[in-house]
Amino acid sequence: MSDNNELGILARRKIEAEIIKPIYEILVREIGKTRAQAVIGEAIEQAAIDAGKAFASKEPNGADVKSFIALQYLWEKDNALDVKVIDADDQQYNYNVTRCRYAEMYHEMGLGEIGHLLSCARDEKFIVGYAPDVKLTRTTTIMQGGACCDFRYRSTKDKP
């Protein structure tokens, strides 16, 4: 399933962050931190929905929990995440991230204060675009000081 030449999500996020950082700094100077974060957040959320739709359009049998699980190698590529899977089946995908190189990278780049906007906030919006019948619940993230990120994806469609 995995294409070894395909750019992983961590590498993509680093490239994006290098572009966003000076834009964010100018926005903070011109309109203030609160408004700058709102603008960045809104743009990233829409990009995540669009990315989810683009990934879904490539699924020959439709996008669902099972096909989403098969995509996880992209987020984990380059040793980006240490993941402990709790449940993974056709109806749910539950796991904890115990180490997050995304968070480490944003902090190293001086973007820790918006790292949650650049990565964490995408997760819920990506699944909206990818498989609207799948819902994400998460109560904590490493990016915002938690010991882990608790991802709980659940299909809202009844089993056939």
Image (spheres, helix red, strand yellow):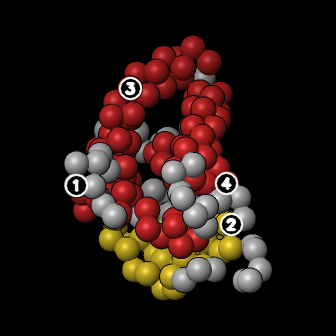
| Res 4 label | 1
**21 over 41 or under it: above or below:** above
| Res 19 label | 3
Q: Amino acid at mark 3?
A: Ile
Report the residue that reaches farthest toward the front: 60
Q: Give the number of the mark in front: 1 or 3.
A: 1
Q: Give the number of the mark in front: 1 or 2.
A: 1
For the residue carrying disc 4, how many other residues have a C-alpha within 10 Å: few (<14), some (14-19), or many (20+)? some
- Mark 1 or mark 2: which comes first in sequence? 1
Q: Dot 2 corresponds to which residue? A: 135
For the residue carrying disc 3, how many other residues have a C-alpha within 10 Å: few (<14), some (14-19), or many (20+)? few
Q: Dot 4 corresponds to which residue? A: 128
Instruction: From the viewer's side, name the closer residue of 67 and 49.
Output: 67
Residue drawn where x is 40% and y is 39% of the image: 111
**26 over 145 or under it: above or below:** above
Residue 139 on image: x %, y % = 61, 69
- Mark 2 or mark 4: which comes first in sequence? 4
Calculate the distance from the C-alpha at mark 2 to the C-alpha at mark 3: 30 Å
Q: Which part of the image, by quadrant, shows the N terminus?
A: bottom left
- Mark 3 or mark 4: which comes first in sequence? 3
Calculate the distance from the C-alpha at mark 1 to the C-alpha at mark 2: 29 Å
Q: Amino acid at mark 2?
A: Lys
Residue 75, by quadrant, is bottom left
Residue drawn where x is 43% and y is 81% of the image: 85
Q: Amino acid at mark 4?
A: Val
